[in-house]
Image (spheres, coloured by chain):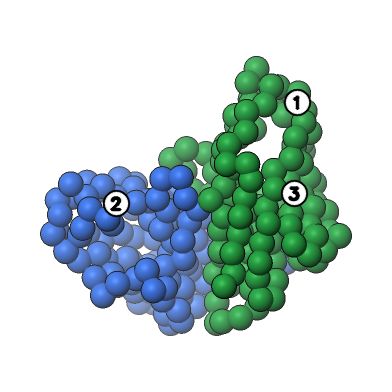
Chain colours: A green, B blue
Amino acid sequence: EDQVTQSPEALRLQEGESSSLNCSYTVSGLRGLFWYRQDPGKGPEFLFTLYSAGEEKEKERLKATLTKKESFLHITAPKPEDSATYLCAVQNYGGATNKLIFGTGTLLAVQP
Amino acid sequence: DTGVSQDPRHKITKRGQNVTFRCDPISEHNRLYWYRQTLGQGPEFLTYFQNEAQLEKSRLLSDRFSAERPKGSFSTLEIQRTEQGDSAMYLCASSTRRSSYNEQFFGPGTRLTVL
């Protein structure tokens, strides 16, 4: 069964303190791995899609990387506005849909 | 591109009542998804439409749930005889095959509270 596990569940950083979030996955055939950001009471906001091991994507202070078993979301010199829940999701090649299978997320709090 | 919209944003109902939610996807997005999210969890897939055809339903979608997308544009999700366990955020997302990133765009969600 396809599964996504995110760690840590929660992370508190000081402004400027870089860190990484982990997403471990098991999937029968990876079509894509997705990172989303979710603010309280809102829908997830798309950040990145990664397709193959070794791939990297960057956006402002965020950089996502992918291996055959896990993905990392690196946050460099975070600011308080980066505080949110970060969700990881996978798509597999099986079935008739492109449904996303999500992890439970990492709640990031960046203190000034 | 006005984004995915959902209505209502909040719904409070009593146990046993029926509720209906609406989702308007991004125009020209032929793929539409419904997810459910409870506190502290990631979204869970409920059902998928390609144009007007419902191609997959999750085991989470009991007989009390029904979804439609009559003309391949907007979609509705109805819950009959609501139960307290139905309390959750219901999220709609849309996508298109033409996107190179294959991403799904989510709406703001409908927060359902069953008393």
Does any portion of residue A36 appear in the rendered image? no
- Contact between marks 3 and 2 (CB within 8 A): the answer is no
Residue for point 56% across, 58% down: A102
Does any portion of residue A42 appear in the rendered image? yes
Q: Is residue A29 left or right of residue B77?
A: right
Q: CA distance from mark 2 to mark 1?
A: 37 Å
Residue B62 location, quadrant: bottom left
- Contact between marks 1 and 3 (CB within 8 A): the answer is no
Q: Is residue A91 left or right of residue B107?
A: right
Question: Callout 3: helix, strand or loop?
Answer: strand
Residue for point 48% across, 56% down: B43
Q: Which residue is mark 2?
A: B87
Q: CA distance from mark 1 to mark 3?
A: 16 Å
Q: Which residue is mark 1?
A: A17
Residue A54 location, quadrant: bottom right
The foreground one among B30 and A14 is A14
Residue type beneath disc 1: Glu
The foreground one among A103 and A35 is A103
Residue type beneath disc 3: Phe
The image shows residue A35 at horizontal and vertical percentages of 65, 52
The image shows residue B93 at horizontal and vertical percentages of 49, 61
The foreground one among A60 and A104 is A104
Residue B34 location, quadrant: bottom left
Q: Which residue is mark 3?
A: A72
Q: Is residue A106 above or below residue A29?
A: above
Quarter holding the N terminus of chain A is bottom right
Q: Are marks 1 and 3 on the same chain?
A: yes
- Contact between marks 2 and 1 (CB within 8 A): the answer is no
Question: Callout 1: helix, strand or loop?
Answer: loop
